[in-house]
Image: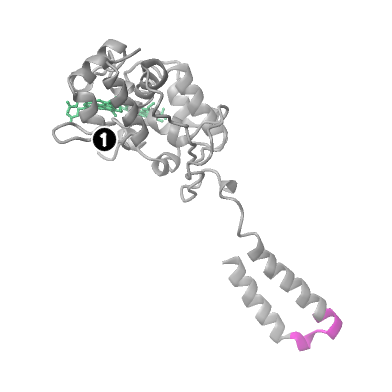
Amino acid sequence: MAAHFAGKLFLYLHSNLHLMNKAFSRLFTFILITIFLSMFSCKHEPDDINPGDPNNPGDTTGLITCDPDTAYFKNDVMPIFQSHCAECHNETTSEHGLILTSYSNIINSDHIEVGNASESDIYEAITDTDPEDRMPFGRPPLSATEIATIRDWINQGARNNYCDSGCDTTVFTFAEAIEPMIDLNCKGCHNASVANDGVRLDTYEFIAEVAQNGRLMGAITHADGYAKMPYLGDKLSDCQITQVRKWIESEFNK
Ligand code: HEC
Ligand code: HEC
């Protein structure tokens, strides 16, 4: 738009050059050309230049190794919204007119102040000291780690970022692989206060039971006859599914 306008201005002034003396008009032409060119030269900035822009895909290549001090939207943040918020804030329910099912609707919700968690309604809602106002509504609060993840993500620019978690199919013990995966992706909807379908996934015993009767694999592989899990969310990665399969084959090692 600006470049288009500058072009018009340039043509207009150029056709009226006879009004100016020659030396001045050369200088003027030079300045206009410089401005004109500079408008194109700043187009190729790195993607991260525009944090919070829903059209900015951010680091989605998966080639970046996770930095422990960075909160990544796809790895760390979306699973929290999926497990703890999406149930009441999806396209159908949209409590308070708020939909929290994807990067673009979260960032466009008007409830995130990019770079400033303490001014963001979403952060205020999860840290509200009054249990009547705190989110998730009527449920236990998010853990301190989950709250810190959302805070850091907003403060670091609320980007749609992603990192290669280094998922390793040779690691499949409960403590190292299964428990952290289920904590992040499932526990918010399957615990003592919310047990969708009567399924609890908040202790080793409950998880082993659901694994033993085939429902765990059925749900995460989206097999026929099972509800597709995580509910409303992206399927777990092939690597994660392999970890679960190997854990089951290992007779549920701890
Ligand atoms: C069990 C249903 C339920 C869950 C789960 C839930 N919400 Fe809500 N949310 C509501 C309802 C109902 C309201 C409207 C409350 C009101 O108007 O007092 C609301 C309102 C909000 C508001 C606007 C109110 C404000 O204080 O600005 C925000 C932000 C919000 N929720 C964020 C979240 C987040 C983030 C999560 C997940 C951590 C979440 N909600 C989980 C039901 C839910
Ligand atoms: C946003 C909430 C939510 C999340 C997150 C979630 N679930 Fe569920 N889960 C549900 C609901 C709702 C049902 C019942 C669905 C139905 O009956 O259609 C369910 C049902 C199930 C069932 C029973 C399936 C069957 O057909 O027997 C299993 C097993 C299950 N979930 C496991 C998981 C696992 C494992 C994860 C994480 C990878 C997960 N869930 C994440 C809400 C959730």
Crowding at dot 1, Cα within 10 Å, few <14 / some 14-19 / many 20+, comes out as few
Residue 237 percent coordinates (x, y) = 35, 35
Residue 241 percent coordinates (x, y) = 31, 31
Is 18 a magenta residue? yes
Quadrant that contains the C terminus: top left
Name the residue at 77% across, 89% down.
18
Is 52 positioned to the left or the right of 21 in the image? left
Name the residue at 73% across, 73% down.
32
Residue 222 percent coordinates (x, y) = 22, 35
Residue 38 percent coordinates (x, y) = 69, 65
Q: Which amino acid does label 1 sit on?
A: Thr
Q: Quadrant of ligand 1?
A: top left
Q: Name which quarter of the figure residue 239 lies in.
A: top left
Magenta span: chief secondary structure: helix
Ligand 1 under 8 Å from disc 1 Cβ: yes
Name the residue at 19% across, 32% down.
227
Is 87 positioned to the left or the right of 60 in the image? left
Quadrant that contains the N terminus: bottom right
- Can residue 237 be spotted in the picture? no
- What colouring method underlies this structural image? one colour
Q: Name the residue under label 1.
A: 93
Is 139 a magenta residue? no
Query: 244 or 27, which lies in front?
Result: 244
Q: In this picture, is 3 found above or below 65?
A: below
Query: 91 or 128, which lies in front?
Result: 91
Q: Give the range drawn in magenta.
A: 17-25
Q: Looking at this rendering, what residue extends furthest in the left direction?
A: 225
Query: 229 or 172, which lies in front?
Result: 172
